[in-house]
Image (spheres, rainbow, N blue to C red):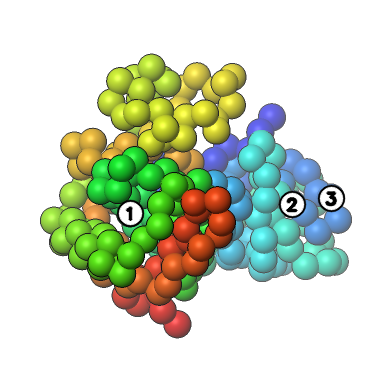
Amino acid sequence: MASKKLYMESIEAGYLRDFSAEVVAVEENAVTLDQTLFYPIGGGQNWDTGTISWDSGKVTVTEVRGRGDVQHFVGEDHGIEVGDAVEGSIDWDRRHAHMRMHTAQHLVSGLVYEMYDGARTVGNQINTNRSRIDFNPIKFTDEMIEDLFHRANEITESDLPVTDCIMTREEINAIMPPDRTNMSLLPISVKQLRVVRIGDNMDLCPCAGTHVRALGEVGTLEFIGRKNKGKGTTRVSYTLDGCES
């Protein structure tokens, strides 16, 4: 049975920091729990870190991977055994930075599509200090970048709500063009999709990541640089106030 992803239950669940779980598998330094708040790397978003504690010890979680069974990587000689009842605690500063960065990515991706002839997001990487988005087909000028970030910061100041829900492919396609939501990249076997929405469909995109509850929490977006990745793809890097160091 796959680990229950507690962080996906709602936008608000992304704000939880502590949880209880049972150890269901141990493979060397990889510990699998029946449920977890730890986000595993995926969808461009980096993993959470934190700690796992139990009656006879406490270990640091340095890496988290897996979409079915979520594996929490800890140090060697940890002493955790199957059946142990544990308490997990995530590194909130890291989690919150990822929430802000990922929501900013959705906003910028939506704006580029709307402002620049349907340029698509073809890749992204969400980190704590800086993040990046790859767009295609597009070649940004300085003026385009300035307009993009000015518009993004105007919208964050409006503090639009960020919500999530479960929708079918057909329901999503009726609101947003499939190329904007990258629907073709999702396994056809998945019929029900968790969708993250900004405002009244200002942006709507299938996503399993963690996000803030309103755009005002994103703060000010700061452009770092852009790089030509070839074949019409341009990488744009950014940070947020308070995330620079």
Label 3 vs 1, first from the N-terminus? 3
- Label 3 crowd (10 A; few <14 / some 14-19 / many >=20): few
Residue 178 visible somewhere in the drawing:
yes
Q: Residue at x 48, y 41 (%)?
A: 208
How many angstroms separate mark 3 from mark 1 (CA)? 40 Å
- Label 1 crowd (10 A; few <14 / some 14-19 / many >=20): many
Most extreme residue toward the bottom is 245
Q: Position of residue 43 (x, y in %)?
A: 54, 46
Q: Which residue is tagged 2?
A: 31
Q: Position of residue 27 (x, y in %)?
A: 84, 50
- Label 2 crowd (10 A; few <14 / some 14-19 / many >=20): many
What amino acid is labelled 2 in the image? Answer: Val
Q: Element at badge 1?
A: helix
Q: Residue at x 46, y 48 (%)?
A: 136
Q: Which residue is tagged 3?
A: 27
Q: Residue at x 40, y 57 (%)?
A: 139
Most extreme residue toward the left is 158
Residue 22 visible somewhere in the drawing:
no
How many angstroms separate mark 1 from mark 2 (CA)? 36 Å
What amino acid is labelled 1 in the image? Answer: Val
Q: Element at badge 2?
A: strand
The C terminus, quarter of image: bottom left
User: Disc 3, disc 1: CB below 8 Å?
Assistant: no
- Label annotation for residue 123: none
- Work out whether residue 63 or residue 41 is closer to the camera in this orientation and state it: 41
Q: Is residue 47 above or below residue 68?
A: below
- Work out whether residue 139 or residue 188 is closer to the camera in this orientation and state it: 139
How many angstroms separate mark 2 from mark 3 (CA)? 7 Å
Residue 44 in the figure: left or right of residue 61: left
Q: Element at badge 3?
A: strand
